[in-house]
Image (cartoon, helix red, strand yellow):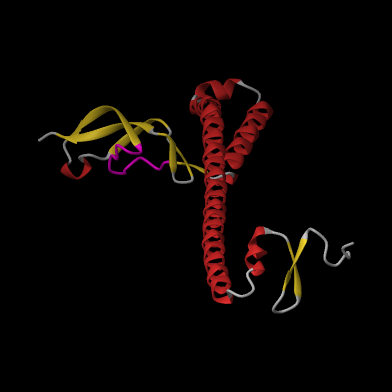
């Protein structure tokens, strides 16, 4: 009868009198007289294990780097999507702001309306402008500036006799707006053209 210590599932290194599990890695220890062969076999197995370890480590590190990059890309895509949503929201608000601007530009009609009502509407207009300003929306300053096709949309040219006015914006037909660094809507303008 075998003792529990030396069961079928364990092996004993006869030289060092140590017990090992019967895993294949330690089957080499059965070779007692040929210890040189055993050492060579163990070295080969160690070399294979180290190579396998490197491959697993490399694979894990690649997977970790890919996960980190994927997370960064997701964050960047989410930021871009959120920015597009904000720009779209602002673009949809601009016609309301345009309507306010047109209403206030018609001073003849404003005189006919109750002054308290006009003040109330002006306050709403101011609140809307303050909100847009608080989220980073600003108007594109135009009159007297040189025409810039990135910021301005030329509706027409106006002839001028002054050379220094050539290429300058003389009238704004519709305001332009910038959100951060992005032009949400280019300004529609009239541009002076020198004619001698």
Image: 137 above or below 2: above
Q: Looking at the picture, tell me which residue is in the foreground, 9 or 59.
A: 9
Q: Residue furthest left?
A: 196
Q: Residue at x 52, y 50 (%)?
A: 66
Q: Main secondary structure of the magenta part?
A: loop
Task: Give the side of residue 183 with respect to residue 125, left or right.
Answer: left
The answer to which image quadrant residue 149 occupies is: top left
Query: How many numbered discs?
Result: 0
Residue 104 shows in this picture = no
- In the image, is residue 159 part of the stretch drawn in magenta? no
Q: Residue 159 at what x, y percent from top left?
A: 19, 31
Task: Give the side of residue 17 with respect to residue 132, left or right.
Answer: right
Q: Looking at the picture, tell me which residue is in the foreground, 10 or 14.
A: 14
Quadrant showing the C terminus: top left
Image: 30 above or below 167: below
Q: Looking at the picture, tell me which residue is in the foreground, 123 or 131.
A: 131
Q: Residue 119 at what x, y percent from top left?
A: 65, 32
Q: Residue 83 at what x, y percent from top left?
A: 53, 39
Task: Write down the region rendered in magenta.
Answer: 140-151
Task: Give the side of residue 118 with respect to residue 61, left or right.
Answer: right
Q: Residue at x 26, y 40 (%)?
A: 168
């Amino acid at each position: 009868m075998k003792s529990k210590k030396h069961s079928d599932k364990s092996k004993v290194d006869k030289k060092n009198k140590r017990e090992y599990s019967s895993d294949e890695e330690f089957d080499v220890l059965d070779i007692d007289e040929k210890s040189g062969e055993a050492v060579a076999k163990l070295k080969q197995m160690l070399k294979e294990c180290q190579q396998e370890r490197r491959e697993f480590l490399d694979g894990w590190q690649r997977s970790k780097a890919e996960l980190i990059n994927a997370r960064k890309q997701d964050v960047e895509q989410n930021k871009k999507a959120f920015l597009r949503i904000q720009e779209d929201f602002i673009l949809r608000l601009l016609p309301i702001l345009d309507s306010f601007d047109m209403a206030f530009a018609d001073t003849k009609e404003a005189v006919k309306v109750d002054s308290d009502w006009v003040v109330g509407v002006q306050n709403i207009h101011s609140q809307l402008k303050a909100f847009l300003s608080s989220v980073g929306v600003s108007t594109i300053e135009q009159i007297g500036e040189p025409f810039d096709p990135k910021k301005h949309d030329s509706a027409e040219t106006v002839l001028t006799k002054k050379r220094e006015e050539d290429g300058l914006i003389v009238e704004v037909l519709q305001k332009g707006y910038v959100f951060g660094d992005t032009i949400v809507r280019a300004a529609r303008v009239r541009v002076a053209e020198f004619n001698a």
